Image (tube, grey):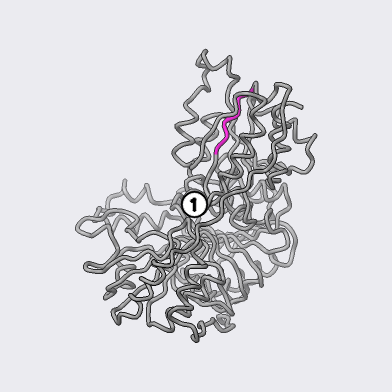
Amino acid sequence: MNGAQSLIRTLVRSGVDVCFANPGTSEMHFVAALDSVPEMRGVLGLFEGAVTGAADGYARIAGKPAATLLHLGPGLGNGLANLHNARRAHTPVVNVVGDHATHHKKYDAPLESDIDAVAGSVSGWVRRGDQVADVGSVAAAAVAASMDPPGQVATLILAADASWDEGGQVAEPLPPRTPAAPDPQAVASVADVLRGGEPVALLIGGQACREPGLLAASRIANATGARALVETFPARLERGAGLPALDRLRYLAEQAAQQLDGVKHLIVAGTRSPVSFFAYPGKPSDLVPDGAQMHTLADPSQDVVAALEALAEEVAPDTLPTLAEPSRPVLPSGPLTANNWAEVIGALLPDGAIVSDEANTSGVALPAATAGAPRHDVLTLTGGAIGQGIPVATGAAIAAPDRPVVNLEADGSAMYTISALWTQARENLDVTTVILNNSAYAVLRVEMLRVGADLSGPAAKTLLDLSSPGLDFARIAEGMGVPSSRATTCEELAEQFRRALAEPGPHLIDAVVPPHL
C-alpha cells in the first residue's frame, strides 16, 4: 500500500467519503488510488475556487467534512477566497495539498512556494505528511482537527514521494472534541440582565440558527421583550413556516444601527460582537451602541443551543415561541424588478429546499418573500468573498441529493466561479440557478456613495459596469451542459422556475432585473 492509498482509506474510515479535486502532477498517485478505494467519491472542479466552495457547501449540509485535493501553493491560492468563507462559517474542511517530493524541493522548481504560509492564512490546523509511514495518522488527525468545535479548515500538505512510496498505514479515526458545556454563571448573569428592565438585544449565530436555537431565542424574546436577531451572514439558517422568523442583522451599518438603537445591553450567543464590514469616513466601526454593555452567553466553541435552552428555562419557562404562519406572496406580473423577482421565488419555493443565497443587492426583498414558505435552509456569504454561491450550491446538492437546491446568484459574483456549472452538469445535480442579471457591480455603486467617492466620472463608472459587452448567462451555461433560459417578466420567471424544479438535473435562468442605481 502506498501513501496515497493509506491516506484515502484513512479519510474514508474517518467518515470523509467525498473529495472535490483539481489535481496536478504532484497529486497523480492520489488520483490513481481512487480506483482502489471506491468508497471515496472524487468530484472534479475546473477551478480551485469551485473546489473549495463546494467542500464548504457540502459540509454545511452534511455536518461532516469533505476533502479537497489541490495542486501545490498556486492551486491552494486559487481556492483561498472560498476557504476564507469556510473559515468564517466555521466549516469543517480537510485540504490535501500536494507538494514536491522532499528531495526535489531544494532545487526551487518553478512551482515551489511557501505552502505552509498560504495555508496558515485560512486554516486552523496545518501539518505536513513527508514520510509515508506517517501519512495515515496525519490524515486522521486532520479530520479530527477540522471537526474541532466550532469547525475549521485543516490542511494536510502531502509530499509527492510520501504519496508514491510503499509502506503506507491506515490509521484509526480520532474522536473530535465536543463543544464546551454552557457556563452556568454566564447563563445566570445574562438572565439577570434580561430581568433588569433595560432594553436588550439578543444576537445569535452558528448552531443557534437551527430550529432548537431559534425556538429558544424566540421564547426568550417573547418573555423578556428582548430583540432577537440573527447574525448578518449565518452559515446555515433554517427558515420558513413553523419556525421563528427572526430578522438578520443588516449588512449596511446604518441599518444595523437602527435595529440596535436604544439597546442598553447586547447579548451574543454563538457569534461575535457586531462590527461594520468596512470603515467609512466619520462613522464608527463598532456597531454596539454607545453606552451599551456587551454580554457573551456562549462563544462559538461552546454548546450555544444548550446555553440558549438553559437561558429560556430560566427566564421563559412557560413562554411559547412565535412561529411563522404558512404564507406565500401572490405571484406578481409584468416586467421583473429588483423586488418582484423575490416574490416569484417565495411563491414557488419547494418544500425542503436548500437556498444558496448570493443575490447580494438584488436579494433585499428575499427574506420577507420567503418567511412563510415551506421550511428551507439558507446558506449565506459568510466571509464576504464573492464567488461562493454556485460552488456552495454544488456541494450542498452532493450532500443532499434528495433535496432541491436553489442558487440565487448575482451576475458579477457568478463570473468568479461560473465553471462550477460544468461540475453540476457532469454530476447531474438537482440545482436551479437563478442569475439576477442587472449588468453591474451594484453593491459597489452603493459603496461608492457610502464612502463618499465620486461616481460621476466615466472611468469610475466603467469599472462598475458589466454591460459592455453584456453577459449572456444562458449561452454560457448551455456551453457547459446546463439547460438554460432567459426571463424578463414575472410570468417567464415563474414558468421557467417551475419547469426547472420539475425536471431532474441542473438548470439556469438568466433573470434580467434593472440595476438599483
**Image quarter (top left, top right, bottom left or bottom right) of the C terminus:** bottom left
Vertical placement of residue 113 versus 445, above or below? above
Helix, strand or loop: magenta stretch: strand
Q: Label 1 is placed on what type of residue?
A: Ser
- Residue 6 coordinates in the image, percent (x, y): 72, 32
Please name the residue that numbered disc 1 is placed on.
413
- Residue placed farthest to the top in the image? 107
Which residue lies at the image location 72% right of the left edge and 49% below the top edge? 427
Q: In this picture, which residue range is highlighted in magenta? A: 155-160
Which residue lies at the image location 80% right of the left edge and 34% below the top edge? 36
Q: Quadrant of residue 265?
A: bottom left
**Does the stretch in magenta take in 159?**
yes
- Residue 177 coordinates in the image, percent (x, y): 56, 50
Along the line of sight, the residue nearer the viewer: 211 or 70: 211
Disc 1: CA contacts within 10 A as few (<14), some (14-19) or many (>=20)? many
Q: What is the number of callouts on the image?
A: 1
Along the line of sight, the residue nearer the viewer: 417 or 91: 91
Q: Taking 116 as reference, is 22 left or right?
A: right
Along the line of sight, the residue nearer the viewer: 288 or 458: 288
Vertical placement of residue 151 versus 238, above or below? above
- Residue placed farthest to the left in the image? 282
Along the line of sight, the residue nearer the viewer: 107 or 387: 107
- Please, what secondary structure does the residue beneath circle 1 have? helix
- Residue 383 coordinates in the image, percent (x, y): 45, 52
- Residue 224 coordinates in the image, percent (x, y): 39, 82
Which residue lies at the image location 39% right of the left edge and 59% below the top edge? 272
**Does the stretch in magenta take in 29?**
no
Which residue lies at the image location 48% right of the left edge and 55% below the top edge? 301
**Image quarter (top left, top right, bottom left or bottom right) of the N terminus:** top right
- Residue placed farthest to the bottom in the image? 318
